[in-house]
Structures are given as structure tokens and as C-alpha cells.
Image (spheres, helix red, strand yellow):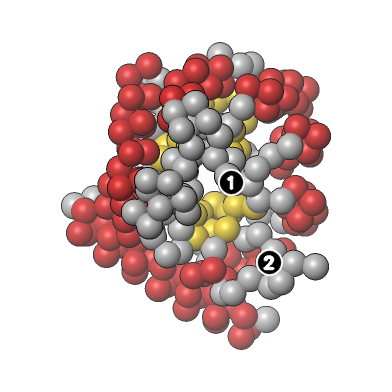
Amino acid sequence: MTDRRDEIATNLAKVEERIAAACAVAGRARDEVTLIVVTKTFPASDVRILSGLGVRHVAENRDQDAAPKAAECSDLPLTWHFVGQLQTNKVRSVTGYADVVQSVDRSRLVTALSREAVRAGRELGCLVQVALDADESGRGERGGVGPGGVAELADLVAGAEGLRLDGLMTVAPLTGEYAGRQQAAFERLMDLSTDLRRNHPTANMVSAGMSADLEQAVAVGATHVRVGSAVLGVRPRLG
């Protein structure tokens, strides 16, 4: 365990240096960017190590893995983000442990999240996932709503009981006009965030950038970056 802690600590320090350097280049303060460590496929023991090293935000994308891990780590001072495509039959479970759902992309999901948040007596933060590989009104290959559908869905979240509209999220697309153009994609997300904040000024969270492209996300103003492999290493193969 000591070896694993040392490995994670070394990787975490390198990622922190990258974020700090990117902030310096962009003329931003380091505390303007929150690191979310994506712990999917890694064990609860790694989450405990991260918490001991000062990490306060972790993310998961599969409820069947996340629910028992979150339960095992319920004593830790962590904010849990759900970042995967979310089916409505998993909403009750996810609402039990997630503090923020970053992958809200359809009205039916908003309805289900609202119902379960109210039932659980919780306020659940929500990000509208933007699909930049979709047309204006379409859906993305990895979830998300096209840019033209952001405002309507955001209004629905903002008006739903038990939910809090926090902002927008995207994943750099693999296809379409933004494929291989991460910074351009993130700039488009920031434009959409500016539009969103005209009607919802507190929805100022912008989640973008991962291990390979966090610098581009920081450069355009992302408030949160989601980093997995650069901190925890190559993911174990899923069974």
C-alpha cells in the first residue's frame, strides 16, 4: 500500500504542476480550477489514498461500480460526481451517493432525477452534457445534447424540484467538426456557458478536459477538469 500511495502521490503532484502551469499561461489563479479525479475501475483503497492526499472531488461513470465504492468511502470528505451515461433505472441508486450528475442530456432523465432527489430529501447538482459531435438538435455518440438543445434542457433542470443547475460539461468529440480540435471544442463550450449564464448566472461550472487535454480546457476557462489515468495509471481491464 505504501508503494501505491507513493505512485499516486507522484502522479498527483505532476498533474497539479500541469494545472498550475496551464493557469499561469492563461493568467488564471490556480484556485479557479478544481481537479476531479476519475476513479472508475479503481478500488476504494485508491479513493482512500486520494482523500488522504487532499483530493476532495472524485468521479465515477458506472453505477454498479460506484455505489458500493461510495458506500465504502462514505466516511471521507468527498464530493462524488457521476459522469457516465445514466439510464433512468439507475437514477435512484445514483441519487443516493452522487452530489453532482454531470451527464444530464434529456428531459426524461431530469424528471427521474428530480423525483428521486425529492424522495431522498437531497439537492442534486446537475450539469447539462453538451454533445459537440451532434447537430444542433441531435444527440452525441457518448451522450449529450446538441448545442441547440442546451437552453431548453437547462431551463427544465433549473425549474425542477430537488435539482440545482450548476453548468455545462463536455467530452472532446472523436467525430465531427471538432474531432482532434480540443481547444476549439472547449471554446465552443465556453460560448454556450456564456449564453447560459445570461438566464442562469449561478450556473457557472464548466467541466471539460481530461488527462490528455486538460491544458486546452484550462486555457479557455474551464472550472473543473476530470483526470483519471494521469493520476491513477492505466485502467484495469473490465471483466
* Quadrant of image for the N terminus: bottom right
Residue drawn where x is 47% and y is 78% of the image? 10
Query: Mark 2 or mark 1: which is in front?
Result: 1
Give the label on residue 142, or none: 1
Q: Which quadrant holds residue 221?
A: top left
Residue drawn where x is 71% and y is 51% of the image? 62
- Residue identified by numbered label 2: 42
Pointer 2 or 1: first along the chain: 2
Judged from the image, the secondary structure of the residue bearing numbered disc 2 is: loop
Asked whether residue 60 is in view, the answer is: yes
Q: Foreground residue, 101 or 216? A: 216
Q: CA distance from mark 2 to mark 1?
A: 21 Å
Give the residue at the far top of this rendering.
159
Judged from the image, the secondary structure of the residue bearing numbered disc 1 is: loop
89 left or right, relative to 165: right
Rate crowding at label 2 as few (under 14), some (14 to 19) or many (20 or more) other CA atoms within 10 Å.
some
Residue 183 is situated, as x and y percent measured from the top left of the image, at: 31, 52
Residue 109 is situated, as x and y percent measured from the top left of the image, at: 67, 27
Q: Foreground residue, 139 or 98? A: 139
230 left or right, relative to 65: left
| Amino acid type assigned to the residue bearing label 2 in the image | Phe
Q: Foreground residue, 179 or 233? A: 179
Residue 20 is situated, as x and y percent measured from the top left of the image, at: 30, 62
Rate crowding at label 1 as few (under 14), some (14 to 19) or many (20 or more) other CA atoms within 10 Å.
some
| Amino acid type assigned to the residue bearing label 1 in the image | Arg
Residue drawn where x is 56% and y is 17% of the image? 156
Q: Is residue 46 above or below residue 93?
A: below
Asked whether residue 218 is in view, the answer is: no
Residue drawn where x is 66% and y is 50% of the image? 61
